[in-house]
Image (cartoon, helix red, strand yellow):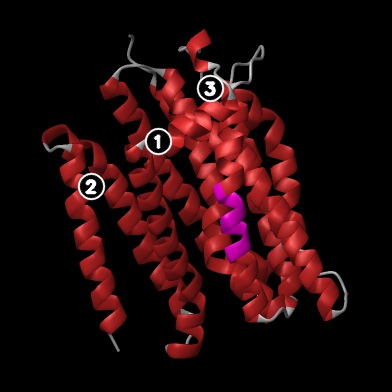
Amino acid sequence: MSVLSRTEKIGYGLGDAASHIVFDNVMLYLMFFYTDIFGIPSWFVGTMFLFARVLDAISDPIMGLIADRTRSRWGQFRPYLLFGAVPFTLSCILTYSTPSLSLEGKMIFAAATYTLLTLLYTAVNIPYCALGGVITTDPDQRMSLQSYRFVLATAGGMLSTVLMAPLAEFIGKGDQAWGYQGGISILAVIAAIMFIICFACTRERIQATKADTSSIKKDIQAILHNDQWRIVGMLTLLNILAVSVRGGAMMYYVTYILGNAGYFAFFLAIYSIGNLLGSALAKPLSDHICKVTVFYWSNWFLAFISLIMFLSR
């Protein structure tokens, strides 16, 4: 297997950068936007987010099964980046819209648009995650590919979270609702462009065999009887839960506990630098230490640091 070009690695990484432009923005800003700008009760927003995660648990495997069975002139997974980019962008803009409705109308609108965003994110991100497995079979090249991916994903998240507040202030001129929608519009268009570049720069070199096209029922049975899948699935769920709780609480913490929303930029900078360093260290560490060992001790260290943060006053 030939060595992948840097262009293809960067192109592939831009796909996750696009995802994190939206994912990190939603994680850090959307709850604050719903409660303090759109005026929706926090209990409803929390319930809506919980429902969306339950929906993810259903829609993600279904999308994976659909993508596995896709056959097109562009491949299995790349078409979703091309044709999903624009609808995904529009759903981002709709999610940050603030129509003049009653409280009940606002709640229905928020639930509908956020659910749409969640489903379209799944439709693009699940095939993207699978794409890395069909670009190359070489383990070293795959690790290098994933290193580029996570570094660029962190950069995309940093771009989104650091620019969102200044963009909202500049565009809104005091109107936070308009400012936030304008900010996400710019960032979502950038994300769409990144998805299209990812589509253009990558190639699917590994073709599915007939054995890969079993029935959906058999696929689900295989998943449920695979203990390794269950372990990884639970770890992924807990990791996303931890990241979402920390990220979602950040704006409230600096605003109402520390009493200065200006600290948010500092928190974001530390968060982004840590992500960049961790992504850059992943390949060097895994080259010299067992990947499972790195994962094991990294999570223990993360748990220890999280406990210190929780106990801090």
103 and 87: which one is in front? Answer: 103
Q: In which quarter of the view is residue 274 placed?
A: bottom left
Which one is in front in this view, the residue at disc 3 or the one at disc 2?
A: 2
Residue 297: image location, x then y, percent: 17, 53
Q: In this view, does 305 lie to the left or right of 191?
A: left
Give amino acid for label 2: Phe
The local secondary structure at tag 2 comes to helix
Residue 75 location, quadrant: top right
Out of 67 and 273, give the one closest to the viewer: 67
Marks 1/2: CA–CA distance: 24 Å
Q: Which label number is shown at residue 225? A: 1
Mark 2, residue position: 295
Q: Point out the frontmost of discs 1 and 3.
A: 1
Return the residue found at the far right. 101
The image shows residue 296, relative to residue 219, as above or below, that is below
Residue positioned 41% across, 27% down in the render: 9
Q: How crowded is mark 1: few (under 14 residues within 10 Å), some or many (20 or more)?
A: few
Residue 96 in picture, x, y percent from top left: 72, 63
Q: Residue 201 carries which label?
A: 3
Tally of marks: 3
| Percent of width and height locating residue 104 | 83, 76
Residue 181: where, in percent of width, then height? Answer: 73, 63
Residue shown at 46% from the left, 55% from the top: 158
Q: Is residue 311 above or below residue 106?
A: below
Q: What stretch is highlighted in magenta?
A: 50-57
